[in-house]
Image: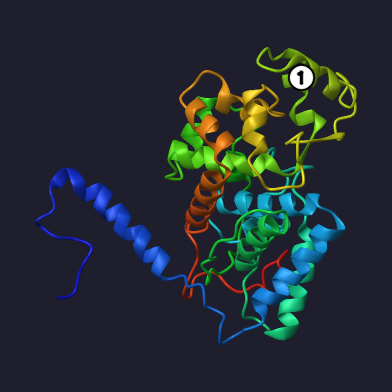
Amino acid sequence: MATTCFSMTIPIFKIRFFLFSCFIGIVSSQLSPDFYSKTCPNALSTIKTAVDNAVKNEARMGASLLRLHFHDCFVQGCDASVLLNDTSSFTGEQTARPNINSLRGFDVIDSIKSQVESLCPGVVSCADILAVAARDSVVALGGSSWTVQLGRRDSTTASFSSASDLPTPLSNLTQLIDTFSKKNFTTEEMVALSGSHTIGQANCVRFRTRIYTNTNIDSSFATSLRANCPSIGGDNSLSPLDTTSPTTFDNAYFKNLQSRKGLLHSDQELFNGGSTDSQVNAYSTDPSRFKTDFANAIVKMGNLSPLTGSSGQIRTNCWKTN
């Protein structure tokens, strides 16, 4: 007998959750790990080679490519809207407060797109390139791999206002939980995804308030940061998000939080006497659990409202619509 997403035998109080589960299942079923196996069989290997080379040239690029995928999916879904430049009809997402002078790696994505287009014109979407590049970046920096679902299409518009709602470095724990909850992530998944800050760097302007005013910070750590981030000026001076192993995807980020050495205010909020302290403790002693939970959470993130079928388009250039 064929199954459906509705049955009169389901209790009323479970219908909402059941329908949501069915919807997620439907979306996931439209994506497939072998989507390009016949139409562009060398796409994934081409992306991996390009990412490996970019990360080898600059380890920080791995974190930047991972962040592009996150900032894409949290605004309009995983549709490569974050890559679109401003046009006369809309203001893109790159100049929204959480992104301006922060997002990078666009040139790497453009280069990958050009290589893939030369192999299979009009086949591989920019949104899928972002998803695969994020996975390959984590692997290149020592993290675990995961199966990337493919078949997303690219949007023809972007949303400056929605990008402004991304979590900020000043977010407290309640705000972080609420922001991720709106995207149907549990608190546990939010903590796992926050572990992406085990790689990468941040501008002084994003942590200045913390190192000069916060009390939940190791004093020697704050002092060391002030040398490169004065109270006035030096906004773009960089410091690693993970002071222990900034170019290795490991669990050191959580150990740093235990020592009150989270770079961003929002980082340290995960370990500040609140409901997520126990999970930080667990990840600090069990790196395998963290990597597994992170992989599961980012696969879920990749399923946020993708455009499939005839929706959207396959952009020839990631920075503009066709």
Which coloring applies here? rainbow
Taking the spot 67% from the left edge, 55% from the top edge, the residue there is 138
Report the quarter where the N terminus lies. Answer: bottom left
Task: Please tell me which residue is depicted at 69% across the width and 54% down the height of the picture.
Answer: 142
Q: Secondary structure at mark 1?
A: helix
Please identify the quadrant where the C terminus is shown.
bottom right
Residue 213 visible? The answer is yes
Image x and y of residue 162, in percent: 57, 44
**Picture residue at 52% right of the left edge, 78% below the top:** 35
Residue highlighted by disc 1? 211
Along the line of sight, the residue nearer the viewer: 311 or 143: 143
Q: Position of residue 161 (x, y in %)?
A: 60, 43
Indicate whether 152 appears above or below 278: below
Query: Nearest the camera: 34 or 161?
Result: 34
Q: Is residue 90 among what the camera can see? A: no
Looking at the picture, how far across and down is residue 226, in whole percent?
85, 21
Whether residue 221 sits left or right of residue 144 in the image: it is: right
Number of marks present in the image shown: 1
